[in-house]
Image (cartoon, coloured by chain):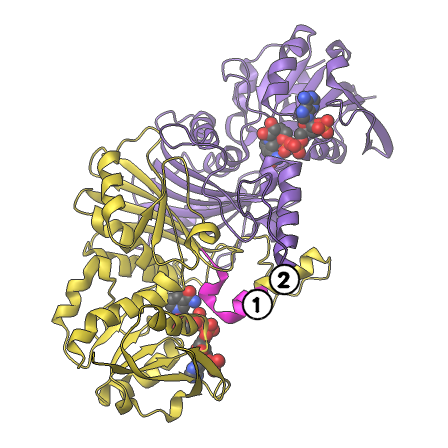
Chain colours: A purple, B yellow
Amino acid sequence: MTQTFDIAVIGATGTVGETLVQILEELDFPVGTLHLLASSESAGASVPFRGKNVRVREVDEFDFSKVQLAFFAAGPAVTLSFAPRATAAGCSLIDLSGALPAEQAPQVVPEANAHVLDGLRKPFQVGSPSPCATHLAVVLAPLRGLLGIQRVSVTASLAVSAQGREAVSELARQTAELLNVRPLEPKFFDRQMAFNLLAQVGTPDAQGHTALEKRLVHELRVLLDLPLLKISATCVQAPVFFGDSLSVSLQLAGPVDLGAVNRVLESAPGIELVEEGDYPTAVGDAVGQDVVYVGRVRAGIDDPAELNLWLTSDNVRKGAALNAVQLAQLLIKDLA
Amino acid sequence: MTQTFDIAVIGATGTVGETLVQILEELDFPVGTLHLLASSESAGASVPFRGKNVRVREVDEFDFSKVQLAFFAAGPAVTLSFAPRATAAGCSLIDLSGALPAEQAPQVVPEANAHVLDGLRKPFQVGSPSPCATHLAVVLAPLRGLLGIQRVSVTASLAVSAQGREAVSELARQTAELLNVRPLEPKFFDRQMAFNLLAQVGTPDAQGHTALEKRLVHELRVLLDLPLLKISATCVQAPVFFGDSLSVSLQLAGPVDLGAVNRVLESAPGIELVEEGDYPTAVGDAVGQDVVYVGRVRAGIDDPAELNLWLTSDNVRKGAALNAVQLAQLLIKDLA
Ligand SMILES: NC(=O)c1ccc[n+]([C@@H]2O[C@H](COP(=O)([O-])OP(=O)(O)OC[C@H]3O[C@@H](n4cnc5c(N)ncnc54)[C@H](OP(=O)(O)O)[C@@H]3O)[C@@H](O)[C@H]2O)c1
Ligand SMILES: NC(=O)c1ccc[n+]([C@@H]2O[C@H](COP(=O)([O-])OP(=O)(O)OC[C@H]3O[C@@H](n4cnc5c(N)ncnc54)[C@H](OP(=O)(O)O)[C@@H]3O)[C@@H](O)[C@H]2O)c1
């Protein structure tokens, strides 16, 4: 008999939490008892797991000493409130909200910086980085030895699901209103999201940068262990339900060897390189899949030291739930 | 009495041509007789101009000696077939298809390189550049003296109308099919366009660059008179009907003076700078307007020699029809 672990998922009724429960099942994670937690609003609801319905309970009343590991997928405020209680009860945790400082819960993507886990002590506290940083790290980590990356310029077009359930409903509602020529009433988004692009996700600071952009830059440097890497980041909200699309331009120390880049991308874990001339899309390729798709691999139009890429990936899977479960897989050998 | 000019619009039933006819009316262009031309498919249709319906005729049968100026807005093949006939008949032309070589028909955006028109001889042949190059030139031309621009990295998310009437219908049809849970049948686009982003517009060459991206790079260098400017360009197809959105990152020779940049953008012609903290969108701001909207003006997160911008503009107006009519306004003093 293999050893099992009792697990809590906080935010189990949300976009990330629901997928996390599915992935625990898909990957046959050795779950003993699964505790699904949310706010009082969803307490009493149930979520299917291994053919049974698991009842959702309120996180406020949960006794963290019952579990060895908790996934926090309910927003930064919930992590900040309950992470101390979990840790005090000896429960390890993986945070998906980005709320915990790096010194407390280092951000890890197994394909990029799994070694960081070796330095941790129980109860573990680990962060799963923002989806864009995760996707970029999966693709750039195996290339970083080959290329002298000097600068990364990225425009990330995010799916509305990056902002949770309400954002998904709002895009559907706005689109239906417009197609039916009914007056548009923006609610979750402050303006028309359907058939439009919004230049920023969240409110920018006095310098004009959003928290998401700063998080992307900071996390990517940490994940690649390139603390001085120059990164220009623009995160945009696209009228797409699921799947992020990243337009990436790298400046290198010298001319790029495209053959070598393709060979690395073909064999690196977690990556699907599409055939030359083809390109991946969020909806057609990435959504529901576990890998980061890479296409449009090309040098600059007349700068051989430029490398351009197009990435698509499922923001809810590798961008969040899958990465978190993969971290748990690496940690369980030491959890017992 | 002011002098009038007899004018032909080729492609008058198309996305650009219809708007061009409207703009000739809006700007009170001194049109004498207006000849509207298209293929045999639309011959006999009519288009309103100054309160009357003007009959559309076949371009094949048109006698170009009847007009002093022709706008070519019917695709490269039509320009290549009929431009020689127009010129031989002494008719000046403005081409919107990008088909003519630069030596024959220089690309001009009045806000950037109007002086090029002074060197031309009758019958004039002038090109209106691609929408992205036009929008970028309007914004970067007034800044180029202030900033030592070393490199431009742009990800342009194009509206489907960039590909004409059929593309617009296809996005509407696909969206309705998906909302009504009917099977999706991509036709004009080779895959799902609704709620998705396509990484390229047109087929890439052996090096991975699309014609549109190469055109953008080439035209922008010419328009700014910066032949060695490094430009990284990715043109993406967005599920947006009208209005292009450009994420732009510039590398400069030294730290950017944001106050000076804002002052230049506030006073330069053809630009609307949105308030700090706000941002423009294609649908909410740009569509139907004559200016290029600029927002998210900011330095790099920790690179003071980086300048980031977000531009939105109407691809059919300043990106095509309006720019062409503005060129005509500059040329008419010499047309008589
Ligand atoms: N969506 C993504 O692509 C993505 C990717 C990476 C990271 N993340 C992060 O993951 C977290 C969850 O995002 P999401 O997209 O899944 O959001 P979501 O769809 O809005 O779901 C939110 C979840 O949090 C729960 N919750 C909200 N307030 C709570 C409270 N006071 N106490 C307990 N539970 C509470 C909700 O439970 P109720 O049903 O009771 O309201 C629900 O289960 C966020 O921090 C987000 O930034 C999201
Ligand atoms: N759409 C944009 O945002 C944009 C911007 C800048 C430049 N442009 C360029 O402008 C041109 C027109 O684009 P569009 O978007 O307006 O396309 P569109 O909506 O598809 O319209 C095409 C127009 O060309 C006419 N046409 C097609 N084949 C013809 C032929 N063999 N002989 C005569 N007329 C013919 C069509 O007439 P029928 O009704 O008879 O078919 C119609 O009037 C293209 O070169 C495009 O690249 C477009």
Residue at 51 percent of width and 36 percent of height: A132
Tell me where residue A143 appears, x and y as whole percent: 44, 38
Q: Is disc 2 placed on a helix, strand or loop?
A: helix
Q: In this view, does B294 lie to the left or right of A51?
A: left
Which residue position is annotated with label 2?
B174
The answer to which image quadrant residue A58 occupies is: top right
Q: How crowded is mark 1: few (under 14 residues within 10 Å), some or many (20 or more)?
A: some
* Frontmost residue, B204 versus A80: A80
Residue at 39 percent of width and 91 percent of height: B60
| Nearest to N terminus: mark 2 or mark 1 | 1
Q: How crowded is mark 2: few (under 14 residues within 10 Å), some or many (20 or more)?
A: many
Tell me where residue B162 appears, x and y as whole percent: 44, 64
Image height of B126 relative to B259, above or below: below
- Indicate if the residue with disc 1 has its beta carbon within 8 Å of ligand 2: no
Chain letter of mark 2 equals B
Q: Quadrant of ligand 2?
A: bottom left
Q: Magenta span covers which residues?
A: B158-170
Chain letter of mark 1 equals B
Tell me where residue B44 appears, x and y as whole percent: 49, 89
Magenta stretch: residue B320 in it? no
Image height of B260 relative to B73, above or below: above
Q: Residue A31: tell me if it is visible.
A: yes
* Frontmost residue, B54 versus B125: B54
Q: How far apart are marks 2 and 1 (CA)?
A: 9 Å
Q: Mostly what secondary structure, the magenta segment?
A: helix
Which residue position is annotated with label 1?
B169
Q: Quadrant of the C terminus of chain B?
A: bottom left
Image height of B136 relative to B186, above or below: above
Q: Are dots 2 and 1 in contact, CB under 8 Å?
A: no
Q: Is residue B67 left or right of residue A162?
A: left
